[in-house]
Amino acid sequence: MNSPYTIKTLMDGLNFPEAPLIDQRGRIWCTELFAGAITCLDANAVRRLSVGTTANGMIEDAQGDFYITDSAENVVRWANAETGEAKPLFDKTNEGETIHRPNDLCFDKLGNLLVTCHAEARTTPDGYVVVQTLAGEVKKVSTKKYFPNGIALDALGTTLYFSETYKHRVWKATWNPNACVIEHEVPWVDVGGPIGPDGMCLDCQGNVYVTVFDQSKIEVISPEGTIIETIRLPYARPTSCAFDTSGQHGLLVTDADQGLLFSVNHAAEGLPPFRRS
């Protein structure tokens, strides 16, 4: 593979890793989906904490703890980053419907929590996006999707992006954080299949970086909806990506095929995520 970037393995031997992040203390984390664990690289030592049956998406709150999706148990959990103590946050909407296969998640600028639920929606449009408001209400905000997956907001917190994996496309929507509603959503960019886009993150210029599962690449999409760069990877199944906003590691990427978390020395400045206080 001819690539302008240096690829550096940071963790290996992982069991379907996803959701890479750098915490507020500078430690590198990811989930291990099939191990039901969150895994930390701290001073060259790897530490695993069991948090459930599966562990899909993961984000950090302002206190340094994690919100984690468990797709096998159909629940979103809070977990302490030091001890691994985990407790359920919610598993149903306010209408009493069990959330089906929660997958990825992000906070908005007010601290509301957005979660993609992929259901079993590879061949039928049964997937959706829910929000847990600061008041504790859980409701659907987008429906009838084929396996919704990665999700992220822009710097203003009003433009929402999410993957629809089995339609091979990224959606763009207007997010109203005060009312917790999507006011407009459109299919935005097709990144190709046969499977499709997975996790995503943004840089400070508003470009969207989206991993394309089974295609050994990350597509970089401008705010105008043009693919401006394809980052070719030496591994087949990138699942998620996130910037180290300190600039030390560049772009962090997880790969399910080889069980790796690795860095790409991309020079873009990563957009810091919103966190719930």
Image (spheres, rainbow, N blue to C red):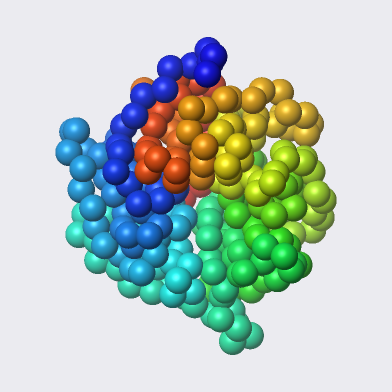
The residue depicted at 44 percent of the width and 45 percent of the height is: 256
Q: For the C terminus, give its image quadrant.
A: bottom left
Q: Is residue 242 above or below residue 60?
A: above
The residue depicted at 64 percent of the width and 73 percent of the height is: 139
The residue depicted at 64 percent of the width and 25 percent of the height is: 230
Q: Is residue 269 above or below residue 197?
A: above
Residue 228 picture location, percent across and down:
71, 23
Q: Is residue 181 above or below residue 156?
A: below
Along the line of sight, the residue nearer the viewer: 86 or 163: 163
Residue 128 picture location, percent across and down:
67, 66
Exactly how many numbered labels are in the figure? 0
Q: Specify whether residue 268 is in view.
A: yes
Along the line of sight, the residue nearer the viewer: 85 or 257: 257
Quarter-of-image position of residue 144: bottom right
Q: Is residue 38 left or right of residue 220?
A: left
Q: Is residue 212 left or right of residue 164?
A: left
Along the line of sight, the residue nearer the viewer: 276 or 168: 168
Residue 179 picture location, percent across and down:
69, 64
Residue 83 picture location, percent across and down:
20, 59
The residue depicted at 51 percent of the width and 41 percent of the height is: 237
Q: Specify whether residue 173 is in view.
A: no
Q: Is residue 179 left or right of residue 92?
A: right
Q: Is residue 104 above or below residue 6?
A: below
Name the residue at the bottom extreme: 96
Quarter-of-image position of residue 126: bottom right
